[in-house]
Image (cartoon, rainbow, N blue to C red):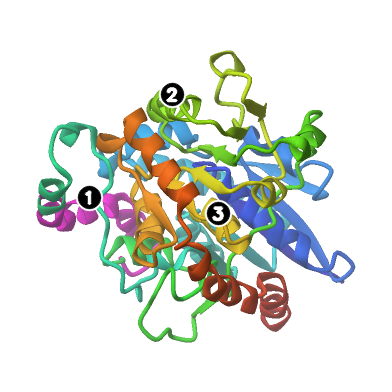
Amino acid sequence: MKKKVLFVGEGIALSHIVRPMYLASCIDKDKYDIAFACSKRYKKFVCHKIDNYFEIFSLSPEEFNSRIEKPFKVFDKKTLIKYIDCEEKVFSTFKPDLVVGDMRVSLGISLRQANIPYINIANAYWSPFSTQKRQTPEIPLLSKVSLKNKERLFKIMLPLVTKRYIKGFNELRVNAGLHPVNSMEEMHCNGDLNLYLDVPSLAPTRPLSKEHMYIGPITEFVDNELPTWWNKIDSIKKPIIYFSLGSTGNLALLGEIVNALNKLDVTVIMATANRISNEILSEKFFVSDYIPALLAIEKSDIVICNGGSGSIYQALSKGKPLIGFPTNMDQCLAMNMVEKKGLGKAIRPNMAKSDFIANEIMKMLNSFQYANKFSKIKEEIRRYDAKKLFTKVIEDFL
């Protein structure tokens, strides 16, 4: 009888759906019975690719972004109870031998209660072993405060923020007879095995215990169809920019970014993730809801994104510099090391004015410094084969 593997995606961002979907596609269907659970919003990405689909409750990206302003409400007790209830129904129906989850923190409770092995996939900057300084996210109440003063305030507030953030999670763990966690990092990396979709130079850690390992980034996500205008791109002689804010990018910055691009003699390939109306865009924009990102990046000179790790690794794997517009802590942590390594530029909302953005784009287009820095990171990314390493992990586990 085939072993059953359940993949669970967290609905707060598309990345937490397509990453486990890619990993599900890596394992042998002749050996394993595979199922996927996520919110209804993402069902279209799963159907026809994985035989068994289960609908579960998740916060939407919009709800998650609104809750970040009040950390104790992000994964509060009420929300986690809803998560756990629907997870338990899936466990009861599918009866998995192993569960693989991406950012689904509630699995750190429900799977312990069900006594089912749990592989957690995450970025290494969320690891308890991370050596990265916590980055200051954008907080609307502090929008008028300088970044330097924000960082001072955030350093003072972080212990309280952490306590409130993990409060509901810990209450439910204690109720279930489990030990409480001490940090956000322990909450987000609570698997029997925690696999990090990073390379060490961009998400450094202290030496890892046997329950934690790097398997490298995933750059091949969902196979989106080519848009009807695709072949027109090859005849364009102007610099090409690939632009996507993804499912979690700050739409409040869209106007300034679009205005900056309109000031420049460039062509823009733009993926809207079904969040942006084409009506606000000029003829220089080649637009589709979803685009095969790696192919678009290959044609492009630079990448503009929300600063999320998925877009970062796609750009770097193709040797392209990037400009990121991070707002939440995940994006800020991801862009932090990119800037430190001189591989891209992070622009915070208080600096995101069209003239400044246009100037940074031109500096990047005219700079030769980036070309010399990409050979090392491209080689490090190539050394990790997430598909091969993940397949071996599954075989060893089962």
Query: SS at mark 1?
Result: helix
Measured Cα–Cα span from mark 3 to mark 2: 25 Å
Q: Residue at point 15% right, 46% down? A: 150
Q: Position of residue 272 (x, y in %)?
A: 59, 30
Q: Is residue 194 visible?
A: no
Task: Please say if the residues under marks 2 and 1 sit with CB atoms less than 8 Å apart.
Answer: no
Q: Position of residue 133 (x, y in %)?
A: 26, 65
Q: Earlier in the sequence, mark 3 or mark 2?
A: 2
Q: Which residue is mark 3?
A: 310
Amino acid at the residue labelled 3 = Gly
Give the magenta-colored segment's residue range: 153-180
Res 394 → quadrant: bottom right
In magenta segment, residue 155: yes
Residue in front for this viewpoint, 281 or 112:
281
- Image check: 41 left or right of 69? right
Q: Which residue is mark 1?
A: 164
Q: Residue at point 78% right, 35% down? A: 230
Amino acid at the residue labelled 1 = Arg
Measured Cα–Cα span from mark 2 to mark 1: 39 Å
Q: Which residue is mark 2?
A: 259
Q: In front: mark 2 or mark 1?
A: 2
